Image (cartoon, coloured by chain):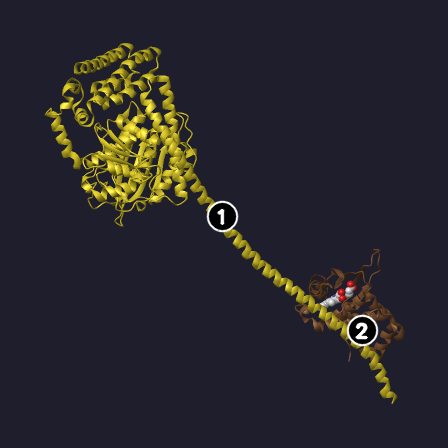
Chain colours: A yellow, B brown
Amino acid sequence: MTEASQPDTVSRKRYQRERKAREDAERLLEDKSRQLFLANEKLSSYANDLEQQVSERTKELSEALARAEAAITARARFIATMSHEIRTPLSGMLGIVDILVTDEIDTEKSQLLEYAKASGESLRTIVNDVLDFSRIDAGSMHLEREPVDLRSIIVGLLELAKGQLGDDVNRLSMTIDTDVPERFWGDATRIRQVISNLLSNAIRYSETGPIEATASVIKTNTGTMRLTVGIEDSGIGIPEAEKTRLFKDFSQVQNPLTKAAQGAGLGLALCKRIVEKIGGNIHFHSVPGQGSRFWFEIPIDVVGLVDRKATKKLPSLATSLVGTRVLLAEDNKINQKVLGTFLSRMGCIVTITSNGQEALDAFAVGKFDVILMDLAMPIMDGFTAVKALQRIWNIADLPPVAFLTAHVVQSLDDIGEDVIVDAYLTKPITYNELQTSICDLLDNARGKDAQTKKIWQSDYKDGIIPEFEDVRALIKLISPEVAAGIVVGLDKATLLNLVEDLVNSVTEALVKLRAYKRAGRLDAITHQAHALKGASALLGFRSVAQILSMLEYHNEAYSAQEFEHQLKRLESEIDKIRQALKVDQ
Amino acid sequence: MKGIIFTEFLSLVETAFGEDMVDSVLDTADLPSGGAFTSVGNYPCEELIEMVTVLSNMSGIDGEKLQEDFGAWMMDMFEREYPGFFEGKTTSFELLEAVDREIHVEVQKLYPDAELPRFETERTAPDALKMVYKSPRPLEHFCKGLIRASVENFDESASINRCPNTSGTTDVTFNITLEPKAINCD
Ligand code: HEM
């Protein structure tokens, strides 16, 4: 049995050891598997964390993006609001300065006023550009689809530019291919803005030499038309280094040769944005010292149907506004005063109302030649008023309507299709702009009104306007076209007042002009002559205006004797008027 | 040190001397672990040395000889259990050179708590390899057994000489010189 018992004891020891080893192993394995489990858990929590982090990051990012976008929109809106807020008071300011400029006789003061006017105008350009930029940024620049008459735009711009050029207006010329359609669909305001920008750059950067506006079209093989409009100058050109940043925002070609460059340098950048928005391109070619040519090409769409504006002719500044009867609806008192004075100065007869309702009440067919309607007014806004007018009256019987707005109208949808509008005038409105616009409006409407005008004219010729019978001597001195308007549009007392004013002003000016000549203050002479030239022309004293124009443009070239000779002529012309006044009274 | 070394040592004892010797060694030796070794555990190297000493006393066989034989035993085990490490090796030198460069590197990855020696190898002649064993553990004879088995398993024959240590460190240098294989007369 020893054989059996021995293995027993051995196996017991071994059994205990083996059992301990197994327990150890099991414990170790248990630990290992727990470690594995924990490691696994950690891993999957990492994975979860990662997933969560990724989704958190994504959320953060999209929130940040949304915030950034909101900030951009908010900024654009802020800038738009700010610019808008600036425009309204600026409008009032510029208007008042404009009035002061024409009234001021003291040369030093009027020089200062001219500076104020120039600063104000360049501020206005900047504000407008910034506003346009912010609008494009905010994606809220909407393009109009209206018939565009490129020729009239260019002619109008060249007319305005003449004012900037001073003595050599002959530098301006235009060549518009006959292929360029009479009218095409587009946004006239924007196209005008781009051309105007290019034109004023050309003027700013070339002191002498011709400036030419050109336009041509090409038909693409897809049958669409592309219009190319170019402005070429022979100025200082653009230095190589400037070329790359020409269309960039807030950059400006350094230009020591000419007067301090005005504006914030946003002009070309804005042109580029606008042209691109229209679906076109803008380019330039420039040789330093020889000149630059800027051109843009845009797709156009010819206007097929003849509509109400079909008879439109080129605007002409020669159109006399004297006697034009204007219904003005404008709630802002300063604007009332400014526009009212402007209009009076143009010889218009103004009826001022403070809101749409008053304008409606004041209106009657045949009573007005033009309606100027502010958009935002209390009680009844401009749109509503015009809509009402067009509902109540036969549209053919209504005079042309121009809306006055403090901001560029964004889209026709804002108005409603059933309102027919002839023009938008964006405040601040300068004297010249107002004059040009009213001329335009009248020219457009002339087809319609020609008959009426003719009747007035023949009435005058037949000498059957008794009111002016006793001022015949004076009327004889006034050029016939102007007189035709005056006898219809002004009453006798107003006419006499205006003429007396003019005679007094010129008499005072004569003293000053002599003093300026002695002191060699040629600028002051130019300025003084210019100020009086407009008023004389307005009242139809052609030879007075002519002499003043000579003094304005050529006084530098005059010797003391020649100058004195001109003044003598002026004196005698004024004398004639004075005599006529005396005779008549 | 990995438990597999201990369990393998006990199976060598069992194979060579029988189960009772295993029990006796374990009973006699002073083993903090109680001798309950498992291949998945880790035990102090001293317990291996202690068991070798006890076995030497009991069997009358030299301890160094026992260590060397255990090395050879382990080599056979490695060949059986880790054939991947031997793939592509055509000579014992290639294998020995690969221990430090590849094999132990992979071992360390498999068992991050493994305590492995470092080796420097140099072919001093086409048929001679110098191999320096660097380890804080006194297992040079175990190492010699591993080398011997490596040579034998490639059906080669070599003299393995342990050079006298002059460096003052625990490093041990082996000079392995291949010998033409003795051809037996039948
Ligand atoms: C496929 C081949 C091999 C494998 C898988 C392998 C694996 C191992 C493992 C797992 C240990 C135990 C480490 C510890 O428990 O902490 C070890 C130790 C050791 N190995 Fe290897 N080995 C291999 C080949 C070799 C060869 C060829 C040599 C000899 C040149 C060698 C020399 C040693 C030595 C001396 C130790 C003991 C630890 C020390 O002294 O620090 N091994 N090896």
- Chain letter belonging to callout 2: B
**SS at mark 1 in the image:** helix
> Distance from label 1 to label 2 (Cα)?
68 Å
Left or right for B116, reference B166: left
Amino acid type of the residue tagged 1 in the rendering? Arg
Residue B49 or residue A15, whichever sits in front:
A15
Regarding residue A217, the answer to whether it shows in the image is no
Q: Mark number for residue A67?
A: 1
The x, y position of residue B148, in whole percent, is: 77, 69
Q: Are marks 1 and 2 in contact (CB under 8 Å)?
A: no
Label 1: how many Cα within 10 Å (few below 14, some 14–19, many 20+): few
Q: Which residue is disc 2 drawn over?
A: B36
Residue A471 or residue A8, whichever sits in front:
A471
Vertical arrangement, residue A49 with respect to residue A567, above or below: below
The x, y position of residue A574, in whole percent, is: 22, 15
Amino acid type of the residue tagged 2 in the rendering? Ala
Left or right for A355, reference B165: left
Q: Nearer the viewer, mark 1 or mark 2?
A: 1
Query: Where, by quadrant of the figure, is residue A12 drawn?
Result: bottom right
Regarding residue A455, the answer to whether it shows in the image is yes
The x, y position of residue A508, in whole percent, is: 29, 14
Residue A451 or residue A132, whichever sits in front:
A451
Disc 2 beta carbon < 8 A from ligand 1?
no
Residue at 17% in and 18% down: A474
Label 2: how many Cα within 10 Å (few below 14, some 14–19, many 20+): many
- Chain letter belonging to callout 1: A
